[in-house]
Amino acid sequence: MFLCVIMDWYSRKILAWSLSNTLDAEFCVACLEMALSRHGRPEIFNSDQGSQYTSEDFINILKDKGIKISMDGKGCFMDNIFIERLWRSLKYELIYIQEFSSVRKLRLGLKRWIEHYNQDRFHQSLNYQIPDEVYELALAA
């Protein structure tokens, strides 16, 4: 299974996520559209150089909305450190410790973990605040 996450880098809030059993661009495009419809247009969008994020459909959504595109250097995991840290947390806090017998159960487990991550989990990098709180404060500013 493949997971796409759209994250606000400032607050570390997961804005949208999508799960697929194929590594095509469609589920990433759907995730991007979900994030934009729920949270509006960011000034800059950063991603790695995976084929899903460099696909014409994905890039055109960003260009059509006037969003600046930032892509990580090839093979430079540190360029995308916030999402890499998220993957590590997700693996050690959910994936490696639970066994999912179906896609439906995995989807439910991810939903619960992401809700916890956004709404309850304190983040050292956010001065021990919760992503939802930091995101809402940034919007109010």
Image (spheres, helix red, strand yellow):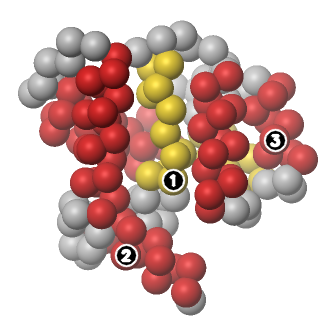
Q: Amino acid at mark 1?
A: Leu
Q: Nearer the viewer, residue 8 or 85?
A: 8
Q: In the displayed orientation, state which residue is furthest to the bottom.
A: 141
Viewed as shown, does residue 22 lie left or right of 29? left
Q: Is residue 71 above or below residue 122?
A: above
User: Horizontal and vertical percent for residue 11?
Assistant: 43, 66
Q: What is the distance, in whole Å, between disc 1 and disc 3 at their CAs?
A: 17 Å
Quadrant for the C terminus, please.
Answer: bottom right
User: Horizontal and vertical percent for residue 81?
Assistant: 41, 45
Q: In the displayed orientation, state which residue is furthest to the front.
A: 104
User: Horizontal and vertical percent for residue 58?
Assistant: 75, 32
User: Horizontal and vertical percent for residue 94?
Assistant: 18, 34
Please report the residue visible at 86 percent of the width from the left and 45 percent of the height from the top.
63
- Label 2 sits on residue: 133
N-term-proximal mark, 1 vs 3 = 1
Q: Is residue 55 above or below residue 133?
A: above
Viewed as shown, does residue 49 lie left or right of 119? right
Viewed as shown, does residue 127 lie left or right of 57? left
- What secondary structure is marked by label 2? helix
Q: Amino acid at mark 2?
A: Glu
Are the two marked residues, 2 and 1, in contact with CB atoms closer than 8 angstroms?
no
Quarter occupied by residue 125: bottom left
- Label 1 sits on residue: 15
Please report the residue visible at 42 percent of the width from the left and 43 percent of the height from the top.
83
Q: Circle 1: is it few (<14), some (14-19), or many (20+) Cα within 10 Å? A: many
Q: Circle 3: is it few (<14), some (14-19), or many (20+) Cα within 10 Å? A: some
Viewed as shown, does residue 138 lie left or right of 128? right
- Label 3 sits on residue: 61
Residue 66 is labelled as: none
Q: In the displayed orientation, state which residue is furthest to the left.
A: 97
